[in-house]
Amino acid sequence: MAKFWKVSAPVWAFFERQTRFFRLGKRVALEDIMSGLSKLGFDGIELGVFDVPKDGSSAEIDRTRRLLNDHGLEAPSLYIDIAGHWPLAAFTHPDSAVRRSVVTHFKSGVEVAKSLGVKMVAISPDCDGFPHPYGVHFKDAWNRFKEGVSECADAAGDAGLRFAFEYKPKETRNFSLISNADCALRLIEQIKTSNMGVLLDTGHALYAKEDLPTTVEKLDKMLFHVHVDDNYGDWDDDLVPGSVHDFTEFFRSLMRIGYEGYVGLDIYPMQDPFGECRKSKEYIDEMYAKLGKQGS
């Protein structure tokens, strides 16, 4: 079987599951996550910084590096949580002190990534959008957002890291400021940096009514990282890929642009995270086998 891209699963797929109405399950221990993913044949695990003092402590970094080595896994990207700390507004907050704290938080995440040997950091600031909870108008929000993200891109570049930005049309009660691929490209063009690109989440793109192959080719060399998941087109359900859509042409488009990154899952299992990861990887392996056969 031809294998085109390494495959990773996200650590947050194994957290306590939460919706607007309930909490379900318990967080799986990192040791068990890595052991299970290794046995399932995954190449990597996408890590995250949700609590800097804890996730960035020397003890936690040493433990994580040891587990990665013990289980033969890579960490293709480190997600730096923004919305969890500033749920109403972050980069677009009217208070400059708050905006400064967001950038400082990001820089702390960059230091964690460096300590872990991760080569890329990613953010998804879904909290910045409209209707703006503090009444900030679009032009001011855009300029503040651009200024903050530009500083983050510089910080990542200074550390020798790639910076991947994830877009999404809507999150819970607000429409995201960066809502689709064209908007993300506009932001990158205005910031004018070579180390900032897009994290394409297939679920977000489907939710934005985008055609996946077209979006891949539109992003081209600005496509830094990929999250694969599925939905019905009306919400970010984070289902196993292939549950609703056929991803064959999506993977073909990755081949056409010469994508060289990871194919990472971003699923949100309600009951059986290891089982859902297994189903997801089996589907991706089927795609690889199909494309390899067609290309031979």
Image (spheres, grey):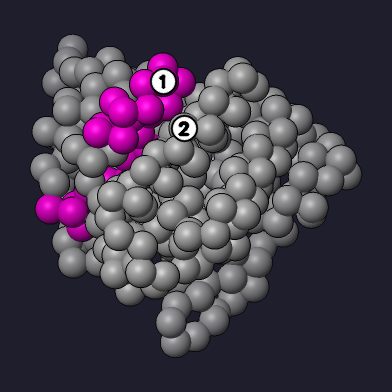
User: Helix or strand or loop: what does disc 1 sit on?
Assistant: loop
Q: Residue 115 versus residue 45: which sits nearer the camera?
A: 115
Q: Position of residue 56 (x, y in %)?
A: 77, 45
Q: Position of residue 184 (x, y in %)?
A: 28, 38
Badge 1 local density, few (<14 within 10 Å), some, or many (20+)?
A: few
Q: Quadrant of residue 25?
A: bottom right
Q: Quadrant of residue 252?
A: top left
Q: Residue 25 versus residue 146: which sits nearer the camera?
A: 146
Q: Amino acid at mark 1?
A: Thr
Label placed on residue 150: 2
Q: Is residue 104 toward the left or the right of residue 209 in the image?
A: right
Image position of 224 with respect to 10: above or below: above
Q: Position of residue 232 (x, y in %)?
A: 18, 64
User: Helix or strand or loop: what does disc 2 sit on?
Assistant: helix
Contact check, label 2 and label 1, Cβ < 8 Å: yes
Quadrant placement of the C terminus: top left
Quadrant placement of the N terminus: top left
Image position of 131 with respect to 231: above or below: below
Residue hosting label 1? 193
Q: Residue at x 66, y 62 (%)?
A: 28
Residue 66 visible in rendering: yes
Residue 292 visible in rendering: no
Q: Position of residue 266 (x, y in %)?
A: 42, 51
Q: Residue at x 33, y 74 (%)?
A: 173
Q: Residue at x 40, y 32 (%)?
A: 225
Distance Cα–Cα, label 2 vs label 1:
8 Å
Q: Residue 274 versus residue 128: which sits nearer the camera?
A: 128
* Extent of the magenta region: 185-209
